[in-house]
Image (cartoon, grey):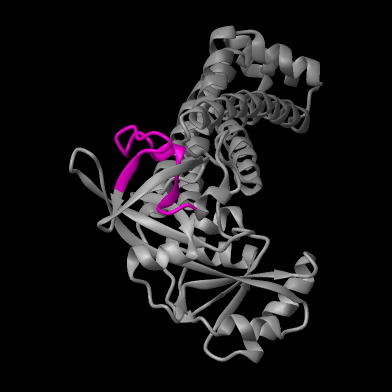
Amino acid sequence: MWKTAFNFMIYDKAKFIGILSGIVISIFIIGAQLGMLNGIYDTALVFLKDNTEYIYVVSPKSTSSGSLVNIDKRIGNELLSIDGVEKAYPLIFTMGNVKYRSGNSATAAIIGVQAPDYAGAPKEYLSGTDLNELHNEGAVIIDAGDIENMENIKLGEYFTLNENRVYVSGFSIKNPGLGQQNIVTTVERARKLSNFPINQVSAFLVKTKSNDLLLQEIIATTIEASIPNIKARTGLAFNQESIDYMATSSGIMFGFMIMVAFALITGLIIVGLTMFTSVKDRMKDYGTIKAIGGSNSMITKMILIQSIIYSFFGYVIAMIILFGLKFLMALVNQALNFSPSVIVFLLTATLIIGIVSSYFSLRKILKLDPVEIFRM
């Protein structure tokens, strides 16, 4: 059955390529859109993206990692008294203004992290970057993806941040800002650069004695019950909470979903029409099968097998192209992220295009009277 179905498919190679191309193009467009959307979300998560192993203690008014309301610095001491908590790292997240050599300026996010563990800092850096150099006066780290935006600034060069002279002590990787430069430095320097209140922090990143997610959730619940006016979330929970907030509070997701729906509908139309034409050209063959005793269920199975084969090849080719695009974009430090849920969705979308598109062809074949083949 599978061999027969495949032979029917490749009989007209032009239509075979046309159907396959329709599936590949549709899945590529859908995948690229969802990959870029996930990349935007990752970028907007700022420090949270690389630091989901901590429990985040923030203000109840904090809606996401990019929108933190300050909390009392003394909460750090209370956190250390809770069973299961090993360390509580303060984090400063505030905005600033960068001025370049040319006099142009831009918005920057200042991220203050505490030595020597630097919880909240990016995890990947260009060769030659040493986090301990942040101890030097005026040292900051910027992302390699922001070099061009910052007028091709080089390692060791100075620039102005909130009217203070700072210099680039290193470059992070895969941590560019969303419409801003992400600048990492020490907690103390972040306070100085932004006049951040001395008795407040943006958040505490809590390191637990066990990395077991269930235990972290229990500890987070205990923290909320023990300390008033705070919110405690595991890194994964705060990550999802931040993404949900960004998805509902902006029109970004809506715009991308329109493109995804358009690509899916276009794929259904193109593949459906091409598949219908292909089946119509082979109507005598299908009629002959029915004339010699082939049942409708057998014909249905053959058409569905063709749809599955088309979907399989289309999905594999589209994914190869998408991951190739991801590799190329990574070379220029641009994010394209395919989460497991996106990969599963793309597989589902491929099957939908393949199977639904075969419906009209199948309907015509099932209505075919075997006697009609002698009149064709």
Above or below: residue 95 compared with residue 34? below
* Residue 96 position in % (x across, y down): 31, 59
Q: Is residue 42 magenta?
A: no
* Residue 309 position in % (x across, y down): 70, 25
Q: Say which quadrant the N terminus sits in.
A: top right
Q: Nearer the viewer, residue 68 or 188?
A: 188
Asked which quadrant contains residue 164, the reply is bottom left
Does 307 sit left or right of 104 as displayed? right
* Residue 81 position in % (x across, y down): 71, 86
Does 190 sit left or right of 50 as displayed? left
The answer, for residue 283, to whether it is visible in the render is yes
Q: Which residues are magenta?
A: 136-159
Q: Nearer the viewer, residue 9 or 23?
A: 23
Q: Residue at x 68, y 61 (%)?
A: 53
Asked which quadrant contains residue 15, the reply is top right
Asked which quadrant contains residue 265, the reply is top left
Q: Nearer the viewer, residue 2 or 114?
A: 114
Q: Residue at x 59, y 19 (%)?
A: 279
The answer, for residue 291, to whether it is visible in the render is no
Q: Is residue 146 magenta?
A: yes
Q: Say which quadrant the C terminus sits in.
A: top right
* Residue 323 position in % (x across, y down): 59, 29
Q: Residue at x 23, y 39 (%)?
A: 101
Above or below: residue 283 compared with residue 338? above
